[in-house]
Image (cartoon, rainbow, N blue to C red):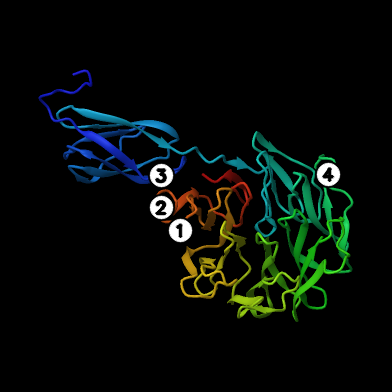
Amino acid sequence: MAQGSDINLITPTISSIGPPVPGGAQATVHVAGTFFEPGLSVVFGSQTPTPSNLTATGFDVLVGPQTGEVTVTVTRLNGQSASTIFEFGDAPSVQHSTTAVAGAALDFDVSTSALLVGRSGSHSVATGGPFSAPIAANNIATTWDPLGRVAVARFASSVLSYAVDTNGDFVVDGGSTIESGVGVAHASLVFDPSGRPAIGYLKNTLGTQVMLARDLTADGDFVDAGELVLVQSFGGTTVRRSELAFDAAGRAAYLYQVAVGNTLRFAYDLNGDGDFADTVGGTPERIVIASGSGDTDCFGVTFDSAGRLALTYQNPANGAAVLARDGNGDGEVNDAGERVEYGPAAVCDVERTSAGGLLFVHGGTGLVQLRDRNNDGDFTDPAESGTVVLSTPVTAVEIGSDEWVASQTHAYLAP
């Protein structure tokens, strides 16, 4: 009686509810228990969903979006009920950019307190509220350096340079020249495991040259031996996109798209000798990923916590987002089962999360994420697959190092 049930009436029980539902998302959960019956009613926090697939020991309900802890109550026709607590995840922290960022110019990285978005007219979005920051014009890649300072690759007056905001005023001045008298169409700025800056860039001077600049001596310039490397050369001058990453051993991996043959190519310094001209264990250091691809923002490369290569791109044949992972560790993604398609997508990106697992986003009419929360190498566990995190049209997307995701108009923390 103290439990509020009548000893003479059948009382339902609730044993479990799952899978977990991220805050701000809608999903179907299964309620397991005993003594359920047709006609029972369900209160799920602020909602009263209609049960489906009802049996005496379970039923499904579509719930959300809600956030935080909610009370779930199941009531039989005889008035007897059972209650428990279900916890939704925190809502994604959505923040509107101070200005829209053109899809072709989206490029960013994050810290825990601020987000950098955009090339050229760059600006910053703080977790406490949007604000503009005069990072300066002509930046073709923007990120944070290991000391938390704004770092940029800049192209102006036929000069490609690297610069850092040394005094923290969000104004980046000066810098070190990488190349002069050139044309540069795209660049990717990252830091290797030793904290040294590296810029992969696509140069369209007397043809197309895929380049890698890396401050190997950490002296602030790129003029020492082996610091400026020609990755590959092509005949045409039109270039597309590129993205640079480093594995835990400090070996460079560069994914780039060129108009010559309209191909997506990948270069990986497998033996760590600083060039991309060798064949290691039967795997060439330069390979073709796909042919016939267009100029999309479906593009990304990273390494998981086990050091295995992961990259994403748009399949030119059907427009689907492809997530390719090097399952056998041979440095490429051409083996059986290493490429999986996730439906038509104009945008995609992949990065390793702070927990070690991969975060993969893809979309166009909206944005869907897959997140390997337990770092077991798949997306098949509860709340790992198919979470819709943005329903508005998306023309550009990037994932940041702290699991922030930015589209051309929004920045939010991936749940």
Q: Is residue 232 left or right of residue 223?
A: left
Quadrant in which residue 200 is drawn: bottom right
Question: Which label sits on residue 378?
Answer: 1
* Mark 2 crowdedness (10 Å alpha carbons): few <14, some 14-19, many ≥20: few
129 and 150: which is toward the camera: 150
- Residue at the spot 20% in from the left edge and 36% down from the top edge: 40
Q: CA distance from mark 2 to mark 1?
A: 8 Å
Which kind of residue does numbered mark 1 sit on? Asp
Q: Are marks 3 and 2 in contact (CB under 8 Å)?
A: no
The three-letter amino acid code for the residue at tag 2 is: Asp
**Circle number at residue 381:** 2
- Say which element carries label 1: loop
Kindly identify the residue that appears in the image at 42 percent across and 40 percent down. 65
The first of marks 2 and 4 along the sequence is 4
Say which label, 3 or 2, has the lower sequence index: 3
Could you say where residue 126 lies in the image, as x and y percent from the top left?
A: 67, 38
- Cβ atoms under marks 2 and 1 closer than 8 Å: yes
Residue at disc 2, secondary structure? loop
Name the image quarter holding the N terminus.
Answer: top left
Q: Earlier in the sequence, mark 1 or mark 4?
A: 4
